[in-house]
Image: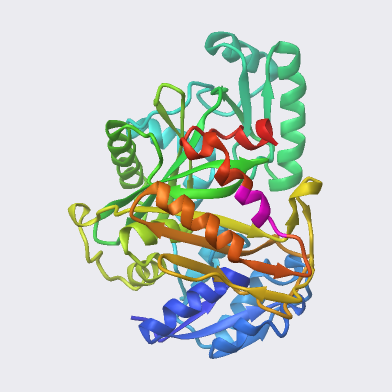
């Protein structure tokens, strides 16, 4: 087991990793930008090093500075958290060349699955359903039009290196398609340095359901059941829960088994998430693999009782999984609300500033993962999430009631947050009945 780990991240996830390390008796080295200087959670690390100015491109994304901090801190491994360098195969490879363990999959698996077109190919080989579409990257508009005619409109153009909805466009006819391809390529090139796009059938009113995975270096691959992530806006998740409501048992089991086949085929190790969309007839289709820990991992931790950060560290150090598939049972229902510093009444405009007072909810089955506190200044340079409110109860109805109470109890004064909006969602009949799809928020609000 490791003696010292560097955390190449900030905020809530950095604090989460520090806590897991402390429980495991592992010393931690934190990094921070000038924008995060003085953050209270940094005091919990054994050492902390500034890696640059507030802008992430000059600090958290600077590979040479992260590696320098790791060498000065004399660490054996780096945990990337999520975002920033977490899915950067080059950073992963640099860690390997510096003889520092990267707590995540191999750079080869990361690079292979990070390209959505390659990931779709692996899924087909593993007999995992994929959305009908082009066999590979589109070469020109004529090919796109031909594929679209074969599978039928509307169609979806997606960037092979994409994420967060960037490089993604819907086309309802041939004229739309040609314009959409040009727009998607331009945006993909600007966002990811890769203009490659492919085409697939646009699934009307899909659900977004993902499967949490763990895989060790001894050939063991298990799933930790699924999470429902359909409550989102602009392809960004707002609320996640487990188990997915109204998902037939057969669909659930087949989806989880498909995720296991896919990661075995890709020789994947460590934690990862296999994402699917589910249509109105409960057919499921693979969309991508997130080769990292995810924001919503606490939902799975609550229903399975398995510490995913601890599992990541143990796997990276070479330990075999201590459990088998039959040992992993999903108990009760968990819901997570992302608390963002945003004004939901004004198109979710970011709302940085000083938190004048903060009161955190508690009670049985309530968990609040956050680095924020009274007096904390929410910086304008990073993602607007300041915390995650998670509840776990015996039933989904009880979990909704508990979350509504906890959201009402949460007080964050001085800035606007999405807490009030979450209460609206949880009271909406479609959410209560488990009838949410990815377009629910836009249609309703």
The mark total stands at 0
The quadrant the C terminus occupies is top right
The reply to whether the magenta stretch includes residue 432 is no
Residue 365 position by quadrant: bottom left
The x and y percentages for residue 16 are: 50, 73
Q: In terms of depth relative to the viewer, which is nearer, 284 or 412?
A: 412
- In this rendered view, identify the residue nearer to me: 416 or 106: 416
Q: What stretch is highlighted in magenta?
A: 417-423
**Percent position (x, y) of residue 41?**
60, 82
Above or below, 235 against 96 in this view is above
Magenta-drawn stretch, dominant element (helix, strand or loop): helix
* Residue sitting at x 38%, y 61%: 302
Q: Residue at x 40, y 86 (%)?
A: 3
Q: Residue sitting at 77 percent across and 22 percent down?
A: 179
Q: Position of residue 311 (x, y in %)?
A: 35, 67
349 shown above or below 368: above
The quarter of the image holding the N terminus is bottom left
Taking the spot 50% from the left edge, 24% from the top edge, the residue there is: 135
């Amino acid at each position: 087991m490791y003696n010292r780990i560097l955390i190449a991240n900030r905020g809530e996830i950095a604090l989460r990793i520090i806590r897991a390390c402390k429980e495991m008796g592992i010393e931690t080295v934190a990094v921070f930008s000038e924008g995060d200087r003085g953050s209270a959670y940094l005091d919990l690390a054994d050492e902390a090093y500034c890696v640059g100015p507030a802008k992430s491109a000059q600090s958290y994304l600077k590979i040479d500075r992260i590696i320098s901090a790791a060498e000065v801190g004399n660490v054996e491994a780096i945990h990337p958290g999520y975002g920033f360098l977490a899915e950067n195969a080059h950073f992963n490879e640099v860690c390997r060349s510096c003889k520092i363990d990267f707590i995540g999959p191999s750079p080869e698996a990361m690079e292979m699955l990070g390209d959505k077109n390659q990931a779709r190919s692996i899924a087909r080989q593993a007999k995992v359903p994929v959305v009908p579409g082009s066999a590979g990257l589109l070469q020109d508009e004529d090919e796109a039009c031909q594929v679209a005619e074969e599978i039928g409109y509307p169609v979806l153009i997606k960037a092979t290196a994409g994420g967060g909805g960037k490089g993604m466009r819907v086309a309802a006819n041939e004229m739309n398609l040609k314009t959409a391809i040009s727009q998607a390529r331009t945006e993909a090139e600007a966002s990811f340095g890769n203009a490659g796009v492919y085409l697939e059938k646009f699934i009307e009113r899909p659900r977004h359901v993902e499967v949490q995975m763990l895989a060790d270096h001894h050939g063991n691959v298990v799933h930790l059941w699924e999470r429902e992530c359909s409550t989102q806006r602009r392809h960004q998740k707002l609320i996640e829960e487990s188990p997915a409501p109204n998902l037939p048992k057969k669909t659930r089991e087949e989806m989880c088994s498909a995720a296991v086949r896919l990661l075995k085929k890709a020789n994947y190790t460590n934690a990862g998430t296999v994402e699917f969309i589910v249509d109105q007839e409960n057919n499921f289709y693979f969309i991508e693999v997130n080769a990292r820990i995810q924001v919503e991992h606490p939902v799975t931790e609550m229903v399975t009782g398995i510490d995913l950060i601890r599992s990541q560290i143990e796997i990276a150090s070479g330990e075999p999984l201590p459990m088998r598939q039959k040992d992993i049972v999903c108990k009760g229902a968990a819901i997570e609300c992302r608390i963002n510093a945003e004004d939901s009444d004004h198109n979710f405009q970011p709302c940085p500033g000083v938190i004048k007072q903060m009161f955190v909810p508690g009670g049985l089955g309530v968990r609040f993962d956050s680095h924020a506190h009274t007096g904390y200044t929410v910086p304008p340079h990073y993602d607007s999430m300041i915390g995650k409110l998670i509840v776990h109860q015996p039933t989904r109805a009880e979990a909704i009631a508990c979350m509504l109470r906890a959201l009402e109890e949460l007080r964050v004064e001085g800035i606007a947050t999405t807490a009030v909006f979450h209460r609206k969602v949880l009271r909406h009949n479609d959410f209560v009945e488990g009838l949410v799809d990815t377009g629910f928020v836009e249609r309703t609000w």
